[in-house]
């Protein structure tokens, strides 16, 4: 039986397994979906050797970048982004890496974008932020990174942020895990008073559905969007890649 799965760490509550298992049941497809919860990326060759019937894999935190050396080739978008969240296995045994986070984010933010949304702040500089930066470039939205510590990539650390800087960036995207269940009372440390009703706040987090970050934006009158649709769109795209 053909097998799909997810490579990650501490993934017992992952969206992907529940999503694809339900899909296979509803559509009466003869497939299974398994979590490969590994302590270290070096375990990957072992999995690939043992699991000869794998057709497709999702990849999640913290391996989206570390997985690259284990894949035979990369789709050009994944190569440009520098992160892979979907692997396709060909009958020849060769593997190819794709990034569907880029697609999921673009498709979910597009309905919210207005003509004045020209500059963005990306909070966090981790794996997910790379796909977001690539998507913003394609959408012709200029952006700056905000990080906890000074680094060449980030224009700002959180302490630099003023209400004026917030005001000058009408799109703010949370690419950090701050506010994820169970730590729902936490949020990125930005001056929320600078947010106006013309801002758009996007949170990649989907659990809880409304993070404190989004609540603080909504109080200021901003448009808000969580990561649920992004998650569904990236999964849909992965399915399309595996089955086409
Ligand atoms: N909805 C979706 O489809 C989707 C897809 C991908 C990811 N996600 C979510 O997006 C979030 C980020 O994913 P990721 O893979 O990029 O995660 P990550 O690598 O663990 O963290 C991202 C960045 O967040 C910052 N950060 C981490 N811990 C922090 C803390 N305690 N306080 C402040 N900043 C902190 C760090 O940037 P600095 O060191 O620069 O501060 C880090 O590089 C996760 O919550 C993930 O679940 C959602």
Image: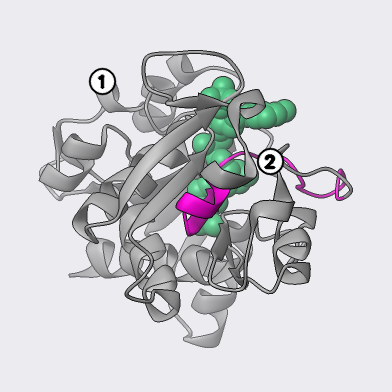
Above/below status of 10 relative to 20: above
User: Which residue is pictured at 37% across the width and 53% down the height?
Assistant: 119
User: Residue 233 location in percent, x, y?
Assistant: 42, 70
Where residue 87 sits: x, y (%)? Answer: 30, 45
The answer to whether residue 11 is magenta is no
| Viewer-closest of 92 and 188 | 188
Q: Is residue 98 left or right of 34 when viewed as pictured?
A: left
| Residue 69 badge | 1
Q: Is residue 13 left or right of residue 158?
A: right
Q: Is residue 168 found inside the magenta-colored segment of the image? A: yes
Residue denoted by label 2: 190
| Quadrant in which ligand 1 is drawn | top right
Mark 2 nearby-residue class (10 Å; few <14, some 14–19, many ≥20): some
**Could you tell me if the residues under marks 1 and 2 are in contact, i.e. CB atoms within 8 Å?**
no
Viewer-nearest residue: 218 or 24? 218
- The quarter of the displayed image where residue 94 is located: top left
Q: What element carries label 1?
A: helix
Q: How many labels does the image show?
A: 2
Q: Quadrant of the C terminus?
A: bottom left
Q: How far apart are marks 1 and 2 (CA)?
A: 36 Å
- Closer-to-camera residue (39/80): 80
Residue 216 lies, with reference to residue 34, above or below; the image says below
Q: Residue at x 68, y 41 (%)?
A: 190
Q: Which residue is drawn at 14% across and 50% down?
A: 91
**SS at mark 2 in the image:** loop
Q: Specify start and end residues of the magenta stretch as a single range.
A: 166-184
Mark 1 or mark 2: name the one nearer the start of the chain: 1
Q: Does the residue labelled 1 lie within 8 Å of ligand 1?
A: no
Residue 175 in the image: state x and y as whole percent: 54, 43
Q: In which quarter of the image is the N terminus?
A: bottom left
Q: Which of the two marks, 1 or 2, is nearer to us in this view?
A: 2
Q: Which residue reaches farthest front?
A: 164
């Amino acid at each position: 039986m053909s097998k799909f799965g997810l490579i990650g760490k501490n993934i017992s509550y992952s969206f992907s397994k529940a999503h694809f298992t339900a899909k296979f049941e509803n559509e009466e497809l003869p497939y299974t979906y398994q979590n490969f919860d590994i302590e270290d990326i070096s375990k990957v060759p072992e999995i690939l050797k043992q699991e000869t019937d794998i057709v497709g894999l999702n990849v999640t935190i913290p391996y989206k970048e570390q997985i690259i050396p284990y894949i035979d080739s990369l789709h050009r978008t994944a190569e440009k982004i520098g992160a892979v969240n979907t692997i396709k296995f060909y009958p020849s045994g060769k593997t190819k890496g794709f990034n569907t986070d880029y697609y999921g984010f673009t498709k979910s933010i597009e309905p919210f974008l207005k003509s004045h949304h020209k500059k963005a702040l990306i909070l966090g500089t981790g794996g997910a932020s790379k796909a977001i930066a690539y998507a913003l470039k394609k959408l012709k939205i200029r952006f700056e990174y905000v990080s906890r510590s000074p680094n060449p990539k980030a224009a700002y650390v959180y302490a630099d942020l003023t209400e004026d800087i917030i005001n000058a960036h009408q799109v703010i995207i949370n690419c950090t895990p701050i506010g994820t269940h169970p730590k729902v009372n936490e949020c990125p440390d930005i001056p929320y008073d600078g947010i106006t009703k013309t801002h758009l706040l996007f949170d990649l987090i989907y659990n809880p559905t409304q993070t404190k970050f989004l609540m603080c934006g909504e109080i200021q009158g901003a448009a808000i969007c969580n990561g649920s649709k992004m998650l569904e769109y990236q999964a849909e795209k992965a399915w399309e890649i595996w089955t086409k």
